[in-house]
Amino acid sequence: MIGCAVHRTAPSAGDHDPMNRIAESYVKLVLAVGQHDADYVDAYYGPPEWRAEAEERKRPLPEIRAEAEALIADLQARPPQTADELVRLRHQYLLRQLQSMVSRIDMLAGKKLTFDEETRALYDAVAPTLDASHFQRILDQLETVVPGDGPLAQRVEAFRQGFVIPRERLDAVFKAAIDECRRRTREHIELPAGESFAVEYVTGKSWSAYNWYKGGFHSLIQVNTELPVFVDRAIDLACHEGYPGHHVYNALLEKHLVRDRGWPEFSVYPLFSPQSLIAEGTANFGIEVAFPGGERTAFEHATLFPLAGLDPAKAATYAEVQRLVQMLSYAGNEAARRYLNGEISREDAATWLVRYALMAPERAAQRVRFMDQYRGYVINYNLGQDLVRQYIESRGGTADQPAKRWQEFAKLISSPRLPSGLK
């Protein structure tokens, strides 16, 4: 995920562009909603006086909602008359982000939505519904890869325990993964001068890692070490949170849209909005972009396994198990859908995650805590990844065309395209 921090100055919203007036109002409304919802403002690096104003006024939700509706009407009354695709995308983006804001305000005011209604309203997308038989077919494949006695979830967890990064080696493994992800990204994407991020290790969170974008092309990435960190997470997190994931995504939006174009709306990031599906989807797909084919397993075998003190000869087998486990990711969506719709208890949701997502009980409990806090946000990771992959491949960015894949990926993370625009 990505997170919040501020105090960089965005370009002034000039009178020459009427869209900038709407955009400035939008930014201030996002900050105002943030006074009612601690998780809503995920990143902000615009004028600090705008945040100070939001904190001092603490506008009531009905007033914020009314202004958002007025901005929506204003946007609908002025469709863009231009051939500039980015300007047209900007108009669509502002409109849909404001509509999402209204839905979030309604939820904060007590409106109840089903899981699918919520994700459509907030994230501009609905995840497919899959029954237990879908996941059972994948579990049957795993039965042959991880044979033995006892429940499959316990066997897979016992297998994975042999691939935990020792705490004293964690930083070295992560630094090596980050360096390689950055090297590969820099070969294809021009990063802003001076971009950087720092890594911190934390505990007691409902997420496994978080990117807090500070503005000025700098991020703070926190890695949750409360539960064991497996060796595959090094590449996952280095790509997802860093290169070419959240850190690069935020830095390119700041460079190309905030600084170069002077569009203030991209100096703020409301977490519960369509922007999150693009952010999480590109961050996950970025792993495949950076490490196509067998390149990831080759790098883990040659570099990360030795650094972690693990047997490199087991890297290929571990990668195959992880590939199959990853195919169970939509089981998390199903657990969230049923739990948040009130169809199952939190205990049943955790049991479902153990059985069909093969999570250890403590990791399943952590994921249910995530659902309690972030609700339908869970679709942004897997559905987002799938939509991004389909979009980029439809434009020629297939696995056998890595240069084109990087080109289309870079264009996507430098633009305000919406989830519905990926189809």
Image (cartoon, grey):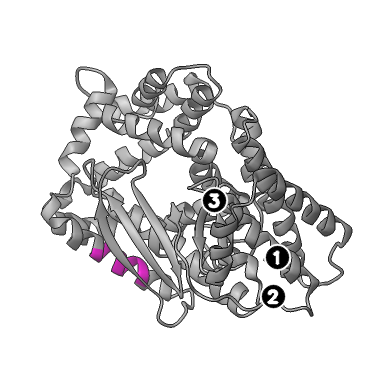
Q: Amino acid at mark 2?
A: Ala
144 horizontally vs 148: left or right: right
Front-most of 174 and 423? 174
83 horizontally vs 413: left or right: right
Give neighbour class at mark 2: few <14, some 14-19, many 20+ (Cα, 10 Å).
some
Q: Which mark is residue 23?
A: 1
Q: Which residue is mark 3?
A: 35
- Compared with 341, 268 (above or below) is below
Mark earlier in primary sequence (3, 1): 1
Residue interval drawn in magenta = 175-182
- Compared with 203, 3 (above or below) is below
- Label 2, secondary structure: give it: loop
Asked if marks 1 and 2 touch (Cβ < 8 Å), the reply is: yes
Q: Amino acid at mark 3?
A: Gln
Front-most of 235 and 75? 75
Query: What whole-number distance in Å separates the C-alpha atoms at marks 3 and 1?
Result: 19 Å
145 horizontally vs 124: left or right: left
Q: Which residue is mark 2?
A: 13
Q: Is residue 344 magenta?
A: no
Mark earlier in primary sequence (3, 2): 2
